Image (spheres, rainbow, N blue to C red):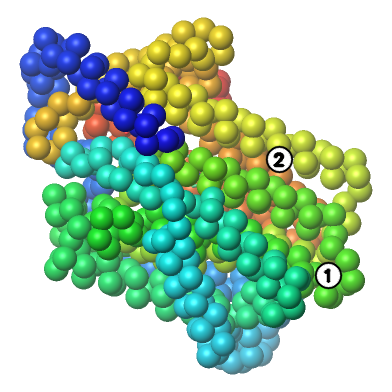
């Protein structure tokens, strides 16, 4: 969205607020009647009161997730991506032998590569030109500006990588694959450092103090984050940077490097690897083409910045989302053309649903409901919500088109394209390539319930009205 368009959008929103000034007092009364000031502060945004069980789960995840990533890395690098072989070795030769022989080891090259990459991405994020996009209003009432230059950063990064490796021969295109173990160690060091850094920053130098949430549990705060939008200066936003750059820019670069490694190993690149690279590239490019839209998704509009996002973006995303290409290097799959066409069609259908659903929400919010959805005027529920400064704001919930079928039909599209990505690996290599679809299903189901709580807290009776109009959460007539 261009700055000018954003300006007119704000004007429209301001006009809408003026038009309804007469009812504003009533709205406050209604909202306050339904949800007292203290209840609103508690329910909208990240949880403040957490159970001991929640704290235990968060602590366990912080300790075990890195082991899970190491396990999958080890299963691919030493055991051809078999998930059971490492356990068998541990049982026959002992756990210590497994650790000594098969765990990733740090190398100076791996650290140099990782931190040079990170620094380079930070420079691109800070200095490449880009329009200014705006996020959703935060619980404390801030509407933050973001530099939206991800597409340019993606293009520059990939052009330099491909030009430097294939064009000029400065380094092998398989460099990421070749240093994968030491990159894993380096990114873990960074992911944990970032988690602790953000925890301390939230206490001593918060960016927007009023948007912090303290739960009373250091473990929970480390995991879920305290600051909502930690920043350096006005524009260097930790959330947008870490999700987009070391996370999503890396995704296609890693795949490309693993495709190059496959070429080195077997002398050609399989059609399954090409299709996987294509589907991942569609998803990644969509993210950057629509980076402005991403500013209003749950990641940016709801999640605070703790281990969940800082380690997740630094380690989980680049290492676990790319597992299929690690698999295909060790287990090349030549898809039959009918099967190839089926997986391609499934992936594109998933992408179409994903984009079309997200677009409907974006357009209805941008036009304040003055648009057609599936050829008819959009049906919306006009809502109010209160920020922690006590001010009443207005928004709307779309309940026609895809958003009339279920409350999260966009997730159906995401799950379909995720399944297609996994299917590129065929059925003869065990479960590892299917990790992604299992994980996405769990992640999105959990998101549905988190979003339900958040929206109930934010919109109160309006959300109940919307839930009655659109009863299904994901798949119509099923769930
Ligand atoms: P949504 O884009 O669906 O955002 C949910 C938010 O939208 C709600 O909190 C609410 O926020 C607003 N909203 C809810 N219902 C309506 C409605 N009827 N009309 C208008 N606004 C509504 O969810 P996500 O941010 O989770 O996902 C965005 C996309 O990213 C999805 O397609 C998802 O599949 C994908 N995704 C991918 C992931 C990956 O790792 N690959 C991870 C997570 C998501 P409010 O009213 O406050 O604006």
Q: Residue at x 21, y 67 (%)?
A: 201
Going 18% across and 53% down the picture, which residue do you hit? 208
**Residue for badge 1:** 263
Placement of 62 over or under 303, stated as above or below: below
User: Is 225 left or right of 366, judged from the image as shown?
Assistant: left
Residue 18 position in % (x across, y down): 17, 15
Q: Which secondary structure, mark 1?
A: helix
Q: Would you say residue 297 is visible in this rendering?
A: no
Judge from the rendering whether residue 182 lies leftward or rightward of residue 50; answer left or right.
right
Which of pointers 2 and 1 lies earlier in the amino acid sequence?
1
Q: Which quadrant of the picture is home to ligand 1?
A: top left
Q: Which residue is mark 2?
A: 347
Q: Residues within 10 Å of mark 1 (few under 14, many from 20)?
A: some
CA neighbours of label 2 inside 10 A, class few (<14), some (14 to 19), many (20+): many
Could you say which is closer to the camera, residue 303 or residue 69? 303
Residue beneath the point at 54% across and 43% down: 289
Pick the residue in front: 278 or 220. 278
Residue 475, numbered circle = none
- Could you say where residue 7 lies in the image, as x and y percent from the top left? 32, 30
SS for callout 2: helix
- Pinpoint residue 42: horizontal percent, then vertical percent: 16, 41
């Amino acid at each position: 969205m261009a700055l000018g368009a954003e300006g007119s959008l704000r004007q429209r929103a301001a006009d809408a607020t003026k038009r309804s000034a007469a009812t504003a007092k009533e709205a406050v009364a209604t909202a306050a009647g339904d949800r007292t000031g203290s209840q609103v502060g508690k329910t909208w945004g990240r949880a403040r009161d957490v159970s001991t069980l929640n704290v235990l789960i968060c602590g366990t995840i912080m300790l075990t997730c890195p082991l899970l990533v190491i396990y999958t890395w080890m299963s691919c690098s030493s055991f051809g991506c078999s998930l059971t072989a490492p356990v068998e070795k541990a049982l026959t030769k002992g756990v210590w032998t497994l650790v000594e022989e098969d765990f990733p080891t740090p190398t100076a090259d791996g650290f140099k590569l990782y931190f040079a990459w990170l620094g380079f991405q930070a420079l691109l994020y800070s200095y490449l030109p880009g329009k200014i996009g705006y996020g959703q209003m935060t619980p404390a009432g801030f509407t933050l500006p973001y530099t939206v230059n991800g597409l340019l950063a993606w293009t520059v990064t990939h052009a330099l990588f491909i030009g430097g490796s294939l064009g000029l021969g400065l380094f092998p295109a398989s460099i990421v694959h070749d240093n994968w173990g030491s990159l894993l160690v380096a990114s873990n060091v960074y992911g944990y450092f970032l988690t602790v850094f953000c925890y301390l920053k939230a206490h001593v130098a918060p960016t927007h103090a009023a948007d912090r949430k303290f739960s009373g549990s250091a473990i929970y705060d480390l995991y879920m984050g305290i600051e909502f939008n930690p920043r350096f200066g006005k524009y260097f936003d930790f959330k947008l940077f870490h999700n987009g750059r070391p996370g999503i820019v890396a995704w296609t670069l890693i795949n490309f490097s693993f495709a190059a490694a496959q070429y080195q190993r077997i002398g050609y690149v399989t059609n399954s690897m090409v299709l996987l690279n294509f589907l991942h590239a569609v998803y990644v490019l969509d993210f950057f083409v629509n980076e402005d839209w991403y500013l209003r998704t749950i990641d940016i509009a709801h999640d605070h910045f703790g281990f969940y996002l800082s380690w997740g973006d630094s380690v989980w995303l680049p290492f676990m989302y790319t597992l299929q290409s690690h698999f295909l290097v060790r287990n090349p799959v030549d898809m039959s053309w009918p099967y190839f066409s089926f997986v391609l069609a499934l992936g594109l259908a998933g992408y179409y649903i994903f984009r079309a659903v997200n677009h409907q929400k974006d357009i209805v919010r941008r036009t304040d409901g003055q648009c057609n959805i599936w050829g008819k005027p959009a049906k919306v529920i006009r809502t109010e919500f209160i920020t922690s400064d006590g001010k009443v704001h207005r928004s709307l919930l779309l309940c026609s088109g895809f958003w009339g079928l279920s409350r999260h039909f966009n997730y159906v599209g995401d799950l379909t394209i995720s399944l297609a990505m996994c299917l590129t690996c065929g059925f003869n290599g065990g479960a590892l390539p299917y990790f992604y679809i299992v994980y996405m299903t769990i992640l999105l189901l959990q998101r549905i319930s988190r979003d339900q709580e958040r929206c109930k807290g934010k919109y109160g009776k309006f959300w109940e009205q919307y839930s009655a109009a659109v009863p299904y959460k994901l798949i119509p007539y099923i769930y």
